[in-house]
Image (cartoon, rainbow, N blue to C red):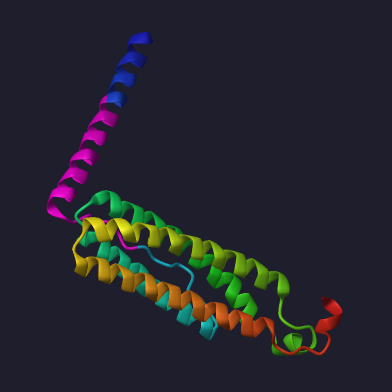
């Protein structure tokens, strides 16, 4: 029994060692070749209301651009940090899409009498704040890219950050407008 467990643990250790060597050599090859093959991230929620559809389409385009940009980098550590941060943004965008559709898709009669769903608006604003924090993380990476990459790549990266910042601002403005919409008895619910 001990010999079987010993052989099994040896096989597992060998498999782990081979995997580690493979990933290390892949990262080294990526650093040497200047290309990091990260898969593109997909926003799975599609949205039902116009503001959310527009937001999610723009965010998906930005996620694709970030994936393409990561493949151009000569340092895999920078590309990995960008990939992880944009993956977190995409996951947050799925939540934003669901909450946003509940806010913008609220029945017009209900909205007229009761007003917008303040609880959902606060949840959405919290999720957007997390997105802003992730954008700040991408901005921190910007200084490393400016130091380690070509000026053209640094400019392209700045443009990508500006795009997602503008997209977030557009959605924030739409949410603010929605939260200030007129309601007949909304004052009683506050």
Is 183 drawn above or below residue 6 in the view shown? below
Where does residue 149 sit, x and y in percent of width and height?
21, 59
In the image, what residue occupies the spot 26% across and 35% down?
Answer: 20
Direction from residue 84 to residue 27 in the image, left or right: left
Where does residue 98 sit, x and y in percent of width and height?
57, 70
Q: Residue lying furthest left in this view?
A: 33
Where does residue 43 sit, x and y in percent of width and height?
43, 67
Looking at the rendered image, the quarter that the N terminus falls into is top left
Direction from residue 91 to residue 82 in the image, left or right: left
Is 116 drawn above or below residue 141 in the view shown? below
Which quadrant of the figure has residue 118? bottom right
Which quadrant of the figure has residue 83? bottom left
In the image, what residue occupies the spot 52% across and 85% down?
Answer: 50
Looking at the rendered image, the quarter that the C terminus falls into is bottom right
Task: Say if the magenta span includes residue 18.
Answer: yes
Q: Give the range drawn in magenta.
A: 14-40
Total labels: the figure holds 0
- Main SS category, magenta section: helix
Which quadrant of the figure has residue 95? bottom right
For the residue pair 150 and 51, the one nearer the viewer reads as: 150
């Amino acid at each position: 029994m001990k010999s079987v467990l010993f052989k099994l643990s040896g096989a597992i250790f060998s498999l782990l060692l081979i995997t580690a060597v493979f990933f290390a050599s892949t990262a080294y090859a990526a650093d040497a070749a200047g290309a990091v093959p990260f898969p593109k991230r997909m926003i799975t929620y599609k949205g039902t209301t116009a503001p959310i559809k527009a937001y999610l389409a723009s965010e998906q385009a930005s996620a694709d651009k970030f994936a393409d940009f990561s493949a151009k980098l000569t340092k895999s550590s920078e590309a990995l940090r960008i990939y992880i941060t944009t993956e977190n943004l995409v996951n947050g965008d799925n939540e934003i899409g669901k909450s946003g559709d509940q806010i913008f898709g609220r029945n017009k009669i209900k909205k007229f009498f009761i007003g917008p769903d303040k609880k959902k608006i606060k949840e959405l604003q919290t999720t957007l704040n997390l997105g802003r924090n992730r954008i700040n993380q991408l901005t921190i990476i910007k200084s490393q890219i400016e130091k380690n990459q070509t000026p053209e790549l640094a400019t392209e990266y700045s443009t990508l950050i500006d795009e997602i910042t503008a997209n977030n601002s557009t959605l924030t403005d739409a949410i603010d407008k929605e939260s200030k919409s007129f309601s007949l008895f909304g004052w009683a619910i506050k």
